[in-house]
Amino acid sequence: MPTDQQISIMCDVARSGEADVPREHLAELLALISEDYVEESDCFADQYQLTSKGQALLDERGVGVNEA
């Protein structure tokens, strides 16, 4: 199960397609990728994107990153 820091990274990815990850938290992003919560994006504008597993986790936790 992702940590609070990893959930924060996932929210950044969901909002902007980027992960504003300080160097000391890079391992957290890599863990999310290896656990299939985040993947590199094929879209030119985005660096990363949530996988369906990652989006389901945020939905399950009630994290609404695209709400106005």
Image (tube, grey):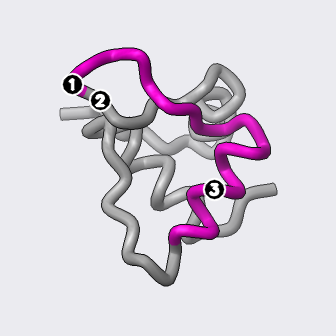
The answer to whether 27 is drawn above or below residue 18 in the figure is: below
* CA gap, disc 2 and disc 1: 4 Å
Q: Mark 1: which amino acid?
A: Ala
The single residue placed furthest to the bottom in the displayed view is: 24
Q: Does the stretch in magenta take in 39?
A: yes
Magenta span: 26-45
Task: Find out whether the residues at labels 3 and 2 contact each other: C-beta distance under 8 Å.
Answer: no
Q: Which residue is mark 1?
A: 45
- Mark 3 secondary-structure assignment: helix
Q: Quadrant of residue 66?
A: top left
- Give the residue drawn at x 73%, y 35%: 36
Q: Does the stretch in magenta take in 16?
A: no
- Give the residue drawn at x 63%, y 56%: 30
Q: Quadrant of the N terminus?
A: bottom right
Q: Does residue 9 appear to the left or right of 54 in the view shown?
A: left
Residue 33: x and y, percent? 66, 44
Task: Find out whether the residues at labels 2 and 1 contact each other: C-beta distance under 8 Å.
Answer: yes
Q: Which residue is mark 3?
A: 30
Residue 31: x and y, percent? 71, 57
Compare marks 3 and 2 and give the one earlier in the sequence: 3
Crowding near the residue tagged with mark 3, few <14, some 14–19, many ≥20 C-alpha atoms within 10 Å: some
Crowding near the residue tagged with mark 1, few <14, some 14–19, many ≥20 C-alpha atoms within 10 Å: few
The answer to whether 12 is drawn above or below residue 64 in the figure is: below
Q: Mark 2: which amino acid?
A: Asp
* CA gap, disc 1 and disc 3: 20 Å
Q: Does residue 12 appear to the left or right of 44 in the view shown?
A: right
Q: Mark 3: which amino acid?
A: Leu
- Mark 1 secondary-structure assignment: loop
Q: Which residue is mark 2?
A: 46
